[in-house]
Image: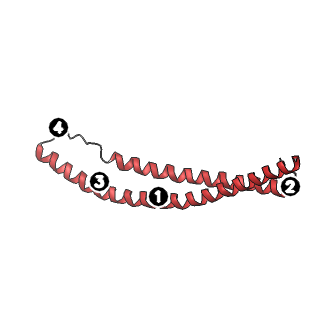
Amino acid sequence: MSDDPRLRRLSEMADIVLQARSAELSRIAAAREALKAQLAALEAPRPAEGLSPAATALVSFDYETWASRRRADLNLQIAARQAEWLLHLDETRRAFGRAQVLHRLQAAERQKRRD
């Protein structure tokens, strides 16, 4: 490890920030994927066994009306999660870059001490 305690501590803090940002990014991605699964479930065929053709048509129409509204709502939520994910992706990339720079500084300092 580095002999400079400030650099070592700064690197440790950068790692903690990176872990936190990565965890938040994963949480947002999981929420987005759950919404996508709900959207996909709306596409599954709904059996209408034992109904007359007229009743089947009415049930299908009512379901499609409801499902259309639900799809619109889910698509808005997915778009919001995607925007949030992109924002956090940038923050995570910055945290990763900071951590990498600090690790390289530590490695350079160790190499310098060896030479």
Question: Which of marks 3 and 4 precedes in the sequence?
Answer: 4
Q: Residue at x 78, y 57 (%)?
A: 10
Secondary structure under tag 2 reads: helix
Q: Residue at x 56, y 53 (%)?
A: 25
Report whether 43 appears left or right of 8. left
Which mark's residue is nearer the viewer, 3 or 2?
2
- Graded by Cα atoms within 10 Å as few (under 14), some (14 to 19) or many (20 or more), the crowding at tag 2 reads few
- Distance in Å between CA atoms under marks 4 and 1: 42 Å
- In the foreground, 65 or 52: 65
Whole-percent x and y of residue 108?
A: 79, 52
Q: Amino acid at mark 3?
A: Ala
- Graded by Cα atoms within 10 Å as few (under 14), some (14 to 19) or many (20 or more), the crowding at tag 4 reads few
- Going by the picture, which residue comes out furthest to the front? 115
Residue 67 circle label:
3
- Distance in Å between CA atoms under marks 3 and 1: 22 Å
Which mark's residue is nearer the viewer, 2 or 4?
2
Which mark's residue is nearer the viewer, 4 or 3?
3
Residue 82 circle label:
1
Task: Give the residue pinned by disc 4.
Answer: 50
Task: Give the residue pinned by disc 2.
Answer: 5
Secondary structure under tag 4 reads: loop
Secondary structure under tag 3 reads: helix
- In the foreground, 75 or 3: 3
Which mark's residue is nearer the viewer, 3 or 1?
1
Q: Amino acid at mark 2?
A: Pro
